[in-house]
Image (cartoon, coloured by chain):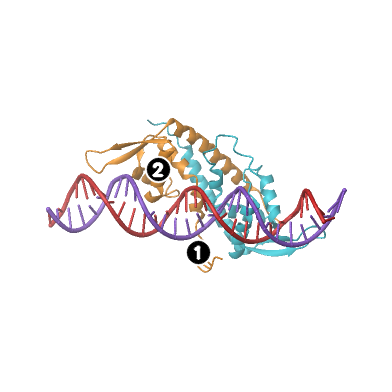
Chain colours: A orange, B cyan, C purple, D red
DNA sequence: GTGGCATACCTTGTCACGCAAGATATACGG
DNA sequence: CCGTATATCTTGCGTGACAAGGTATGCCAC
């Protein structure tokens, strides 16, 4: 039984759900343009997609850990002249391979969805 | 059954994740073509997308419950001349509204992703 | 100095949801 | 009857995005 959530039925955004599984792809893709550090990725994402794919840092860091553990990225600390130390991430070869794979999967899925949604359904 | 996994799949497929949040959209869209029952939706999906968006019935029924509880669909039992009773689902007006909303959200998201992925990242 | 602010990284807890696996029930053919 | 097909429903698990909170450092004004 789930007595909860019957009245609090505010319709959530599916954007959050849609992002599921595509975050790794997004991050890998951004890193393909050169190394970057966490905060940089967050702001890049917000900027390049006009907020459509915005994520918080609390979301991003676990993603980066997964990527690191899977050896899709490597890590380098750098302490700039001014400011706090930053943790830079670089794509590995395996990361590039995975990026290609995920891109392909995304494309396949998106095509299937688009085709389906384009189908006229005027019945009843 | 899972006909997948011909590759070394310690790396899970993101297809499953990508589907997150889009299942309701898919089902609502299919129902826009007229009422249908659970098993019918499962087979329709598999057929119309060549398996790209395949779901199991164990996945679908909870979705249908959510839709029903949210009053996006209504339900009608029908016992055919031959065969077991079927539970037919029809879209409500609210369901149609929600369908439009989800479609819009999907399109926005997909466009953002596509645009992002199309960006060349040959740096470094 | 010290208090405040910005930068940057990290952790914890919660909740939703897709799915595998199994249960149930009905009809029908041999 | 028993096996198979149709059809609906339930349970348990794992995953992952997110909010909220925490830590640490450097910079600047007063």
On screen, residue B52 versus residue A89, left or right, reads: right
- Residue sitting at 46 percent across and 32 percent down? A94
Residue A115 visible to an observer of this rendering: yes
Location of residue A95 in the rendering, given as x and y in whole percent from the top left corner: 45, 34
Location of residue C2 in the rendering, given as x and y in whole percent from the top left corner: 14, 56
On screen, residue B76 versus residue A69, left or right, reads: right
Residue B29 visible to an observer of this rendering: no
- Residue sitting at 52 percent across and 46 percent down? B110
Closer to viewer: mark 2 or mark 1: 2
- Residue sitting at 71 percent across and 64 percent down? B76
On screen, residue D13 versus residue C22, left or right, reads: left
Say which of B88 and A93 sits in front.
Answer: A93
- Residue sitting at 61 percent across and 39 percent down? B4
Mark toward the start of the polypeptide (2 vs 1):
1
Q: Identify the residue position indicated by label 1 in the image.
A: A10
Up-down relation of residue C24 to residue A115 (above or below):
below
Secondary structure category for the residue under label 1:
loop
Q: Identify the residue position indicated by label 2 in the image.
A: A65
Give the Cα distance between marks 2 and 1.
32 Å
**Residue A122's image quarter?**
bottom right
Secondary structure category for the residue under label 2:
helix
Location of residue C4 in the rendering, given as x and y in whole percent from the top left corner: 21, 57
């Amino acid at each position: 039984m789930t007595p909860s959530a019957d009245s609090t039925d505010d319709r959530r955004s599916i954007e959050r759900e849609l992002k599921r599984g595509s975050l790794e792809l997004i991050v890998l893709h951004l890193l393909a343009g050169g190394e970057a550090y966490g905060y940089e990725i967050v702001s890049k994402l917000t900027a390049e997609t006009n907020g459509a794919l915005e994520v918080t840092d609390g979301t991003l860091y676990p993603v980066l850990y997964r990527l690191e553990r899977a050896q899709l990225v490597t890590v380098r600390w750098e302490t700039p002249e001014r400011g706090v130390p930053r943790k830079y991430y670089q794509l590995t070869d395996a990361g590039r391979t995975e990026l290609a794979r995920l891109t392909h999967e995304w494309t396949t899925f998106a095509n299937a969805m688009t085709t389906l949604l384009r189908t006229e359904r005027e019945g009843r």
